[in-house]
Image (cartoon, coloured by chain):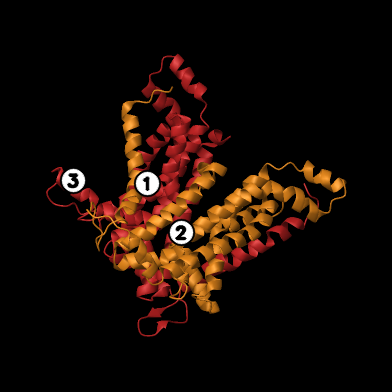
Amino acid sequence: MSHTPLILRLFHWLFMVFMLAPLVVVVLVSFTDKGYIAFPFDGASLRWYSAIWNATGFIDSFWLSLGLGIVSATAAVMFAVPAAMAIAWHRFAGREAVLGLLMSPLMIPAIVFGIALLRLFTHLGLSGSLWGLGAAHTVMVLPFVMRLVIAAATGYDHTLSQAATSLGASGWTVFRRIELPHLVPGIAGGWLIAFITSFDEVTMSLFVSSPGTTTLPVRMYNYIANTIDPLLASISSLLILVTLVLMIILDRAFGLDRILGGKA
Amino acid sequence: MKGQAALPYWLAGPGVLLALAFVAIPLVLTFGLSFSPFSDQTGIGEGFTLSNYGQIVSDDYFHEIFLRTIGLAAAVTVVSLLIGVPEAYVLSRLKPTMRAISLVIVLGPLLISVIVRTLGWTILLGNDGVINNALMAIGIISQPLRLMYSFTGMVIGLVHVLVPFMVLSVWTSLQKLDPATEQAAASLGAGSSTILWRIVLPQVLPGMLSGGLIVFAMSASAFATPAIIGGRRLKIVPTAIYDEFLSYLNWPLGAALAFILLVFVLAVSLGANRYIERRFRQVFQ
């Protein structure tokens, strides 16, 4: 079964070109020495990389997005790990409803989520605040952590916990020394995918960020809406580079197809 | 299994409270908002009215936006099926090393910001962009094709964003396929096209359907890519919601639009999921 028809091979290469073309062109354009986006171009330079440091706001937004990603991924893990243990290891009334509620941010269009949170935060006087942004991102990335931790918890053999308890370990010790280590791969994968999702999120954040709390994707979106110049290409190239490193880590550790399965 | 009946509620409690506070309550508040009256002079008023929904149902402007949104989602879904299904099939037949590399190329873009990917397409699709320049250089066209700010451009950009989900979904059902059935068919004299059509395709149909659903629901609710490639002229429901909220400040109308979109997307994904599970129960077991 190893011979694949030539036409399918050709199709496969075209498909690869289609997937890579927009990313490759962004990286190439970022090295232009022109003041506008043109491709192909003659002179190469790094001027648009040094321009990032002088462009107002992009560096601040990068740090904000980085911090927001770390905080919301960590907070989501705190909420998701016990909830995932309850879902995976217990049968209780309302289990399906709890699971549905915790996974619901995946089903709701980001634009609807965004306006709903804008409405709530205006009500609470939290609009544009860091607290609001953090809460919004935590809820949004919660399902990604839930899914991977549930998957990790499902294969757990409960006789291990019973053995530890019968030898005199307290409930907390059983959790810390036996159950938690078993969940670590799921938690690590979930944290990373939650971080990336938060770091890249734009649509919902457009509604809950303010001029003082503008995340990097929101700043890029607002910038694109006015002008498209090579500055965006150089920022994007750096993001592609960072994502590539994270992606290789994720793929080596967990397999991309398992982590991204059924994202919607 | 643990004995204490209250334990799972304590474990799930914090997460449930978080989701109630930041998912359920905001949605309920927004649903209420969609029944509030609005006037340009006084803003959001008190009371209950169906006029926001009435306006959407009666106004041709909104009919066009909804039709365009459904058309866009349908076109993106069809194109994703047409290219994603064969790609998943090729992937399943590649040698392990090539397959691993190809999978990273197909799935990797999912981790890269939609803004970055869409920026790439604006560079490729512009009137003076890479595609038009290349086509004019080899003499296929004499005038640049209008790809930016066009429906075609929105479809291309969204297919790039969403086709990985289709490949993933079909790829998952291909992995469940037992190669022995293909070999059995071949040993009984079936040609390769018969095997594809009669053996492989029926077994990956659930994967195609669930992939199609994901892609349809996500393209109907996508914002950033259609907003950047389509511009202000080619409005779809998500960009119309954005404008009502942040440009015209008519929050009640925007909330009504958002609720119609939410119900539509949920109905498509939940309803069709039920259907797929009933229709193909034996495949999932």
The crowd level at tag 3 (other Cα within 10 Å; few <14, some 14-19, many 20+) is: some
**Callout 3 amino acid:** Leu
Give the CA separation, mark 3 to mark 2.
33 Å
Which chain can be seen in red?
B
**Callout 1 amino acid:** Thr
Q: What residue is disc 1 on?
A: B77
Q: Which mark is residue A200?
A: 2
Q: What residue is disc 3 on?
A: B135
Circle nearer the N terminus (3, 1)? 1
Q: Please tell me whether mark 3 sits on a helix, a strand or a loop.
A: helix
From the top left corner, tell me how far across and down residue B280 is, in percent. Answer: 51, 36
Chain letter, disc 1 residue = B
Q: Using residue B214 as the reference point, say whether residue B125 is left or right of it.
A: left
The crowd level at tag 2 (other Cα within 10 Å; few <14, some 14-19, many 20+) is: many
For the image shown, how many numbered marks are present on the structure? Answer: 3
Which image quarter: residue B37? Answer: bottom left
Residue B114 versus residue A204 in the image, above or below: above
State the residue at coordinates (49%, 73%): A119
Which image quarter: residue A103? Answer: bottom right
Chain A: what color?
orange
Q: Please tell me whether mark 1 sits on a helix, a strand or a loop.
A: helix
From the top left corner, tell me how far across and down residue A100 is, in percent. Answer: 59, 55
Give the CA separation, mark 3 to mark 1.
26 Å
State the residue at coordinates (36%, 64%): A50
